[in-house]
Image (cartoon, rainbow, N blue to C red):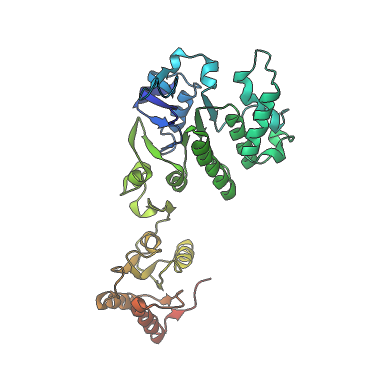
Amino acid sequence: MEIKNGLKTEQLSVGYEKKVLLSGVELEVRAGSVLTLIGPNGSGKSTILKTLTRQLESLGGRILFLEKDGSAETDAGKENWHDVEEMTGTEIAKRLAMVMTQRPAAELMTCREMVATGRYPYVGMLGILGKEDWQKVDDAMGIMNAEEVADQSFYAISDGQRQRVMLARALCQEPKVLVLDEPTSYLDLRHKLDILESIRRLAKEKGIAVITSLHELDLAMKVSDWIACVDGDRVARQGTPEEIFSGDYVQKLYGVDQECFNPMTGALYLKAGKAQPKIFVIGGGGVGIPTYYKLLREGIPFAAGILFENDLEMDAARACASQVVSAEAFTPIDAKALERARKLIDECESVICPLKTFGPLNEANKALKEYAKNCGKLENVVE
């Protein structure tokens, strides 16, 4: 049976102190899916999320929860949307949980006590948790692998551990919708992966609709089912990761040169000037990239080649090198590309060749290395 839970906005306007920053915001996320907001700093991602979580007052439009009411037989094909303006704070808290960048004041609380605050929408005015509530607290900590810090002070643990605790707090709230504002900020690589895997798991296994914002575009590409691009005063574009990260739209959104970002891999590249190259790097298959970066750091302009158009290091070469000699993919390098590379070697002071082996399609680079050696310009690989 299909789980009918979710959230959507209709012509939502958001901002601060009655001043509208973004208007006409139309978003929708369903159970089991992850919607991610991306966009430059200050574009309004957090403002949207704070409005969804009622930390900021909506300045127009509607926020609605989708819920399944009744049985599959009586409600077949029926969707029931509820306007948050018609719901109490407790009713909203039973449907929506949030993990925001600002941590709650919890100087004297253990991690288990912090997670337990997620049960407050379900307890009486005295806030006393029963046996079943505490079991849900412990279950949530177990799901988030946070049991080992249960009795530690919330502020005595690492950022990664705190994020797991906050997700456990949200989970034991039993939400239908989970809102996360930059959940991977300030985390190391391992904890970023841990949090993102947890988000996907909660969405799929618990049937939660997840709305999040991310700065790391490579992670957004991997974790999201749907991406909304926030640009200044509007949500400028929405689509699947495959749709959003095609072409040069993301580079334009963030105002960076096309060569500085690969939308398919999420890789970032520093861009060098196009000065006359002093060194020629014979690379390929990724082995030349460390050399490119070292020369870039040292401010030494260089040329790179001969690289196949689909080579792993082509994007780095285009961004970092003054000139790149390329060849058509999956075909032997032609004489024209070889001649151009030789002329560049003649103009350069030296040649570096990180390549150790040469395949049958790469005989031209082997000949190029031999040419550099005969010219007395071949150096050792830059370590």
Residue sitting nearer the eye, 216 or 302 = 216
- On the image, the x and y values in percent for residue 361 come to 34, 76
Q: Is residue 62 left or right of residue 192?
A: left
Vertical arrangement, residue 10 with respect to residue 302, above or below: above
Return the residue found at the far left.
336
Image quadrant of residue 326? bottom left
- Residue at horizontal 33 percent and vertical 68 percent from the top: 308
Outermost residue to the bottom:
374
Q: How many marks?
A: 0
> In terms of image quadrants, where is residue 149?
top right
Q: Position of residue 238 (x, y in %)?
A: 34, 37
Where residue 67 sits in the image (x, y, percent)?
44, 23
**Would residue 106 be visible to someone looking at this image?**
no
Task: Examine the rendered structure and indicate whether residue 383 appears above or below residue 270.
Answer: below
**Is the residue 145 above or below the residue 190 in the image?**
above
Between 331 and 30, which is closer to the camera in this rendering?
30
Q: Is residue 253 visible?
A: yes
Quick one: 110 or 123, which is closer to the camera? Answer: 123
Q: Quadrant of the N terminus?
A: top left
Q: Is residue 271 left or right of residue 176?
A: left
The image shows residue 177, relative to residue 308, as above or below, that is above
Residue at point 72%, 31% (across, down): 110
In the image, residue 320 lies at what x, y percent? 40, 61
